[in-house]
Each structure stands twice: as C-alpha cells, then as structure tokens.
Image (tube, helix red, strand yellow):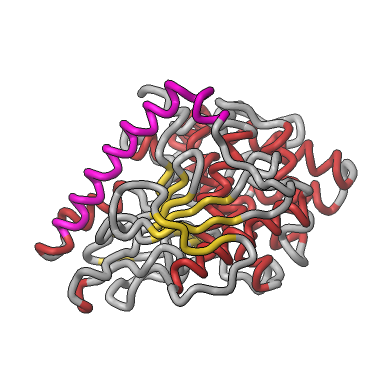
Amino acid sequence: MRPCFHPIECVIPEHMLESIATHGTSAQRQAALNNIRVVYQLRAERAMRASFKGLFDSAIPRAINNEKERVIYDAMRRDVLPGTVARREGDAPSSDPAVNEAYDGGGATYDLFMKEFGRNSIDNRAMRLNASVHYRTGYDNAFWDGAQMVYGDGDEDLPTDERLFNRFTIAVDIIGHELTHGVTQFEAKLVYSQQSGALNEHMSDVFGSLVKQYQLQQSASEADWIIGGGLLTENVNGIGVRSMKTPGAAYDDPVLGKDPQPAHMKDYVNTVSDNGGVHINSGIPNHAFYLAALEIGGYAWKKAGRIWYTALRDKLSENSDFQQCADLTHQTAGELFGNGSLEQQAVKNGWAGVGLTVGGDAEPKGCFEAALRFIGAT
C-alpha cells in the first residue's frame, strides 16, 4: 500500500459510505455514491497540493495580531473553496447556525490548544482558522484539506424519513477532530496508513473529545466519549460515529452497518481497505486513552491530554506504531509527572487494558507483531 502523507482526512470513513451505498434506499445509495466520488476527487486535488507543498505552505494565512483569528465562508452548496465571507473574528453571530457553529467550534479548539498546551493555532504560528460551510449539496462529511476546514450539510436534501446525517458543524468534537489533523500535519506527520494512520485518527479523536469536554467543562467521568454525538439523525440506530469508551458500540444500523472498531489488540483488524484500517483500529489506542484518563480522574485535558499532546509534538514520528505510542506516552508521563507517579501508572494501565505492555519490557515491539501474537494465542 502506498503511504499517504497528504490524504483528505474525512470524519465519515469509506466503509460507512459503502454500507449506505449497498443497503440504503435509492436516494441514500445515490447520495453515498456521490460522496464517495467526491472523496476521490479531493484526493487528486490534495495530491496536487502535496506536489507543490512549498508554494501552498508559503501562502498559509496567519493572524495579523498573532492571536485567534477566524474567518467562516459560505460555499453556497458549490465545490469552489473557500466561498463568500460569512463571519469574521469579532463579528456578531450570523443568522446561519452552521456559520456560528463553525466559528464557535474553531474558537473552542483554538482555546484548548492555546490555554492548556500553549499552542498558537494549528501550526503554532498563529495560522488563521478558515472554514467553509454549506459545501456542495447533500455532502455527508467534513474534512481538513491541509489549509482550512470544510463542512457539508448532511442529508438536508433527502426526505425527512431517509436522512442519516445532520449538518456536520453540529458536533464540536468533529470540528476539533478535523482541526487536530492539521496539528498532526505540522508535528508528528503520522503517515495515513496502517498503524501510523490509525494513530493519526486516534489523535484527532482524543483532542476532538477533549475540545467538547473543555467546552462543557466536563470531567473524564462525566464525559460521554462519543465522537459525533448529535450527527446521526433519529432514523439511525446509533449514538455517534465512534465511541472511545466502548469501541464497536457507536452504531448498529441496517443501513450504516455495525461499528467495526476493536477495543483490544486481540481483535486487531488486518485489512487493505480504509488505508489499512485507520478508522477501524484507532479504537484500540482510543480506548487506552479513555482508560488512562478515567484512572487519572479530573479534567482529562489537564494531565492525560497534556501527555498525549507532548508525545504528539515532541516524540512521535511519521511511522510510529501502537507499541511506540504506548512506550512514548508512558515515557512522557514519567517526564511530566515523575517516574512511578499515578499518572504514569494510569498510562501503563490504559495500554495494558488494550493488550500492550509498556515500561521497558514491552514484547513484541510492533503492532503487527502484537496482533500476530494474540491471533496465535487464540
């Protein structure tokens, strides 16, 4: 499989769209096929951007005053980005809820990274937070394109009883998730394939959930740990796109299919689809973080989030796998809070809860090898 350094990182994975295209009504199937087609078109555009990375990076807009600056655009259901300016930093709220949700969600994400981790926007250089809402008609996704956020309106063009997705600005954790793909782009640069790609998705789920918890001022025990809560309509048997608390239990629906995420290495999914299971196997490190944060207690962004952010910023590299992430977050916990501290022990226990051993005696060293060991033991 060709490594993906500059993918289009959409919150709705292809396996979900494929299930809709197979099991949905005629209108649902057509919408899913249209959205799959868009994914491939966007990948081609992103590949072009990657080829001219220096030119695009040099054109990244940054805040003039080196502080938070948001610009929300209305794409007016077209595919031309960014669209028409709908709200700038400091403007009064718009009459358009999608504009306000994108504005507020971008601000909540900026505030978490700045106030808790000392990071000045996505690139740590005061990158302006641009976002476009109302992208295309019936677009069931949201994505970070390497320079800005883009949000679809879900299934608003379908009959009420056939709608599966609400507008994609409705869930602040999705906004935080996608913007964190930008942070990863500027830091660890995790290759979007296999274990490193699953870690890429994992980091976005971690900080997407933390943005929601931070906005609501919820402790680890109070949080729902759902990614995309409120995104699915009442027509769907599901509570969100993923669950960090209980991977594999976010949805079980005749049209969307069954949530395929494992919560333990013994159930690791070896697949060539989904860039090697990046949206599937991310359930394993997601659950490890949840277990660690719950054991530490209090606000998860204060300690568990700080450990993961420091590891993402300073220690993880392009091809890091699950075992390396476990070892490095354990090491980081020791550096931040002391070797043998409650925090470090919680990180160790979190990874143990998903089948990975840390602390110098981890064996075997790779996620793939670990999967083989568990398969062989069953």
Image quadrant of residue 309?
A: top right
Q: Position of residue 139 (x, y in %)?
A: 29, 57
The C terminus sits in image quarter: top left
Q: Position of residue 353 (x, y in %)?
A: 62, 51
Residue sitting farthest toward the right: 338
Q: Main secondary structure of the magenta part?
A: helix
Query: Which of the two residues, 73 or 182, is positioned nearer the viewer here?
Result: 73
* 270 on left or right of 218: left
Q: Magenta segment: does it hold 241?
A: no
Q: Residue at x 74, y 49 (%)?
A: 65
Q: Residue at x 28, y 53 (%)?
A: 78
Q: Position of residue 53 (x, y in %)?
A: 49, 25
Query: Which of the two residues, 265 or 253, is positioned nearer the viewer here?
Result: 253
Q: Residue at x 20, y 50 (%)?
A: 34
The reply to whether residue 285 is visible in this rendering is: no
Q: Magenta segment: does it hold 46?
A: yes
The N terminus sits in image quarter: top left
Query: Which of the two residues, 88 or 15, is positioned nearer the viewer here?
Result: 88
Residue sitting farthest toward the left: 26
Q: Position of residue 335 (x, y in %)?
A: 86, 39
Q: Is residue 203 above or below residue 95?
A: above
Q: Is residue 269 above or below residue 229?
A: above
Q: Is residue 206 above or below residue 319?
A: below
Extent of the magenta region? 29-58
Q: Residue at x 43, y 73 (%)?
A: 96
Image quadrant of residue 245?
A: bottom right
Q: Is residue 323 above or below residue 39?
A: above
The reply to whether residue 368 is visible in this rendering is: yes
